[in-house]
Image: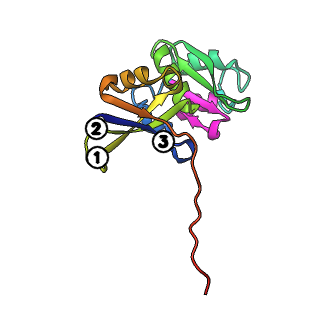
Amino acid sequence: MKTIIKKVPDEDVYYDWNDQIDLTEEKDDIVILGERHYIVFGESTPVSIIEGDYYDDDCGYDYETIEELNKICGGDWEETTFRGYSQGDWCQCFYNKNKVSEGLLKELEIYIMGKVDEFSIQETEDEDDVYYAFVPHEICWKGKKDICEFLGIDPEDATVLEDDGYVKVYNYKEVK
């Protein structure tokens, strides 16, 4: 049997980016704040520094955010913006560049901003034996070969399907 890879229709997709990326090791080195679903991720001290709610004995509340993060949290902090597909789709990310890789930042932007499609994968005859995986849009847009390679599946042994609309059919019964 060929592996059936089926794109889940957008209206049926639900995920939490925290389920996709484990930030256990980086939890002290990343702060994410912004408009996308009112995200606030990070330890309380750096979050309060970024939000301007931190009081420094030397300068009170009058500090430069990055300088204060470097002073209080240590490391070499930088700021970047994650962007989605619409004007209101954004959030800020502050990170310690000595501990957070560019690859992780790119992955965070993809998952936080919803730049993924979900696929169901059925590798056996048993229709209940299905698992799900998310694939970044930049890979989906390249087609079957890239989707399969991302999922670790041989393209020759797979069929990739995407939704192509739907038909709503009414059932009728006789009125008595």
Whole-percent x and y of residue 168?
A: 59, 56
The quarter of the rendered structure image containing the N terminus is top left
SS for dot 3: loop
Whole-percent x and y of residue 101?
A: 46, 15
Give the vertical position of 10 relative to 101 (above or below).
below
Q: Disc 2 marks which residue?
A: 123
Q: Would you identify the image quadrant in which residue 150 lies?
A: top left
Per the model, the C-alpha gap separating discs 1 and 2 is 8 Å
- The residue segment tinted magenta is 30-49
Q: Is residue 8 magenta?
A: no
Rendered residue at 47%/12% (across/down): 98
Label 2 crowd (10 A; few <14 / some 14-19 / many >=20): some
Question: Which amino acid, by three-letter code, is at mark 1?
Answer: Asp
Question: Which amino acid, by three-letter code, is at mark 2?
Answer: Glu
SS for dot 1: loop
Horizontally, residue 59 falls left or right of residue 171, namely: right
Whole-percent x and y of residue 11?
A: 57, 46
Q: Are marks 1 and 3 in contact (CB under 8 Å)?
A: no
Rendered residue at 59%/15% (across/down): 78
Per the model, the C-alpha gap separating discs 3 and 2 is 16 Å
> Colour scheme used in the picture?
rainbow
The quarter of the rendered structure image containing the C terminus is bottom right
Horizontally, residue 151 falls left or right of residue 54, namely: left
Q: Would you identify the image quadrant in which residue 87 lies?
A: top right
Rendered residue at 68%/35% (across/down): 35
Per the model, the C-alpha gap separating discs 1 and 3 is 16 Å
Q: Disc 1 marks which residue?
A: 129
Residue 43 visible, this orientation: yes
Sequence order check, earlier mark of 1 and 2: 2
Question: Which amino acid, by three-letter code, is at mark 3?
Answer: Val
Horizontally, residue 77 falls left or right of residue 4, namely: right
